[in-house]
Structure formats: C-alpha cells, structure tokens
Amino acid sequence: MIHSLEPIIREHVFFKGLEDRHIEFIAGCAKNVRFEEKQYIFRERDPADQFYFIREGLVSVELMVPQKGPAVVQTVGDGDILGWSWLTFPYRWHFDARALRATRALSFDGKCLRAKCEEDHDLGYEILKRFANVVTERLEATRLQLLDLYGTHA
Amino acid sequence: MGHMLELPMTSVPIADPMIPVPYRIERLKRETNDTFTLDLMAVNGAGVTSFGPGQFNMLYVFGVGEVPLSISSDPEDCPALEHTTRMVGAVTNAIGKLKRGDMIGVRGPFGSQWPVAEETGRDIAIVAGGIGLAPLRPALYYLMKNREKYRKIVLLYGARTPEDILYKRELEHWRGKFDLEIQVTVDRGASGWRGNVGVVTALAGRAPFDPSNTVALVCGPEVMMRFAVMELQKRGVEARRIYVSMERNMKCAVGFCGHCQYGPHFICKDGPVFRFDRIEPIFGKAEI
C-alpha cells in the first residue's frame, strides 16, 4: 500500500503555510529515502538536483581536505533541511554530505521543483523565502562558530 | 522515589561576607586542557553551610588575589564544595598551581539561584556553552534527584572541540541512568567524533521540549546566550520563563563596590541568575 507523503510534508514547519495545491505538487516530487551509516548522500561537484528533509538521523556536511581527511563543517539532524545548491546556478553541490548514523529522510526532486518555481512564481517566492531562512540560520551559526566563543580570548 | 531537597530561596546570611574562610584543597582535577575542578573542604567545620544552584563564591589565593567562581558541586554535598574554572587570568592560573592540602580563602555563597525548586511540573531546557556548564551542574544534580517532579529535561551543551567537553563521564552516566535528553555539539569536530558539529543555539531550535510549558536555563558566553535566547523565543518560550546567568567584573560580591553594575542591577547581589524579562531591555546593549 502506498502512503501519501503529504501529511508528513504538511506537518513540517518548513512547509507550513503553503497553499494546498503547492503542498500537493511538492508531495509529488518527494520520496522516502534511507542512508546507512557512512553512506554519502551527495558529493562535492556532483549535480545538485535534490534537497532533503531529515526525518531521523545525523548527517555531516563536510569538505575533503587532501592528506587530512574530511573536515566537518556542520551536522544536520532530525527535522532539518539539507541542501540548497539545487536552487542556485551552477546547481552543483559545494560540499559532501554523509550519514553519521542510519538516516531516514524525504528526498525532493529539485530539478522538477525548480522548473515549477519558474512557472509558478507564487510557489517560487514561498520556496525562496523558506530557503532564505535556512541559509540565514546556517550563516548565523557559521559566524558564531568563527567567533570561537569558547576560546580563551573570546 | 526521589526526595525533595530543601534549597534556600535566598543566600544564607553570612556572618561577615567580607572575611574569607580558610578552606583546604582536597583535590585538583584536570577536566580539559585548560579547565580544572577544585574540591574544597572547610577547615574546622567553618564556612559555607548551604548554597543554591547558580550561586558563586569568591576564592582568594593568598598574596595573589580574589576571583568569583560559580559553585559546581551538588548542593547536598555541602559543606564540601567544587568549583570548575578555566585558567584565564592571574588568580585562576595561581589556583591551577595549588596542590592537595594547600589553603585557599572562600567568601560566600553569593547571588541568586536557578529556579529549579519552583518550576516543578514543567519541561526544563538547559542550554550551556563551554565553561557555562559548571554553574548549571548543581541545578542538574537537583533535577536528577527530583526527576519525578519534572516533565522532559533536556540538556543542550556546546563546546569548542570534543576535547573541551566538561564532565564527560558524568554526562554519560546521566544519559544512561536518568530520563534525560542530552545533546552535545562542538564547534569543531575531530577525527573519530561522531556527534553534532555546530553551535549549541542550533540545537535549541529542534530540541524535544514543549515551548509553551518550558523553563529554560541558559549559561555561557554572552553572545551565545543572546542567540540561545533568540532561538528559544522563536520556538515560543516566554521571556519570563527564560533564565540567564550574567557575568561582569565582580569585586566585593555584596553590592557595595559597584564594579559589577549592570544597568539598575548588581550582578553579584541581584544576579548572577536573572529572569530574562527583567533584563531584556538592557541585554546585549553595548553601552551597559
């Protein structure tokens, strides 16, 4: 039996307030995915055609540093949105994302949604507003990390 | 069933708050690269008889100077005291060089407390950053001993690196033994670290507590507290249910000298723990 993902999407704060027709369309672009521990979700420079809503798990966003290994920039977990490179040219991932433990997520077809946003600017504006919040939160978090708040000279 | 520990609602009157009482160092335990915990016992039974979570003492290294340090031990273990601090200045560096059996002067306890005894029946969200976990530790002891009086208890703790996490063993013990959600994050991960990386304020945005019935206790660097409060308010936690522990340059600890003046308040006497709505207009103001 196939369960619609609509109720899950409708409930999530990220999609809250969207019109029914938009939710329906977004649900049509969504599918359940699962990643095992250490499995890559996406790799730097690969085409960015999805974004994810992490339902349960922990994902590290990282950069591979030659001779040193992956440098973890940030982790995202339950309820978080992962990935915005699908929204901006050249639509390629700028970081790697890897499951730190078994992770369940909803994957959204960014390519399809991007095309729809071009066509329906109301939806496009709503999506951009929501991703602007995600980007703002991540930028703020990164700035705080850079301040080295707990360091001796903070 | 746990028992309800009686906590003094205000500081117990101190015979002479300006005279340090001699304490002997029982142990100096290194917690991280630059932090340590000092275990103290009063000589001849004198000294602090009780304290509340969130209160602080003035510790006097003879011939060097005095420094305010939050009490980080279990209020039930009093008169034994623990203080966790980081070596950042002349006095704390001098403390770090003391040995078991050495003497130190203690004045206190001073200041206001975390309202754990009053806020039963609610979710408790504790947001700590860096050494800010130390002043919250007595509150955690209290909450654990009275676990059945509260709903969800969530501890969100941010440290610089995995090596800088305070009370690691204790956190593991609490996580395993009590119904307590502990989420730890570090600003910079290291190889082998499988946990969260990022600022602690981000955890506050998704932690499992009911914002409409939550009391939040926040302690850490002031910038971290500003963002933590913003995140808690964004979640819907009311300002009157958020408590922050403030820090300024304290000298006398009894509201005489004015060194720790914070707007209309003295941190030493009216704080360090403030209900957020009472300081909201001046919180984060550079001119204050």
Image (tube, grey):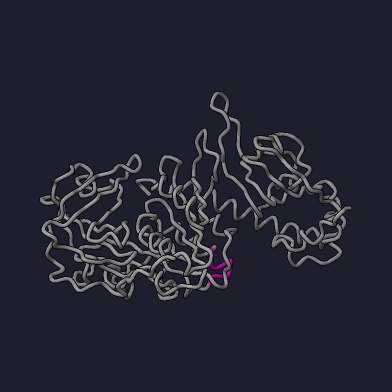
Span colored in magenta:
B232-237
Q: Is residue A48 left or right of residue B5?
A: right
Question: Which residue is located at x 35 percent, y 41 percent?
Answer: B32
Q: How many marks?
A: 0
Q: Is residue B271 left or right of residue B49?
A: right
Front-lying residue, B77 or A5: B77
Question: Which residue is located at x 37 percent, y 57 percent?
Answer: B137
Front-lying residue, B135 or B86: B135
**On the image, which quarter does residue A75 sit in?**
top right
**Residue A8: percent from left, percent from top:** 76, 59
Residue, far top: A67
Question: Which residue is located at x 84 percent, y 51 percent?
Answer: A29
Q: Magenta stretch containing residue A13, yes or no? A: no
Question: Which residue is located at x 78 percent, y 65 percent?
Answer: A18
Above or below, A115 against B136 in this view is: above
Which quadrant is home to the N terminus of chain B? bottom left
**Residue B272: percent from left, percent from top:** 33, 66
Q: Is residue A103 left or right of residue B49?
A: right
Which quadrant is home to the C terminus of chain B? bottom left
Q: Is residue B42 left or right of residue B275?
A: left
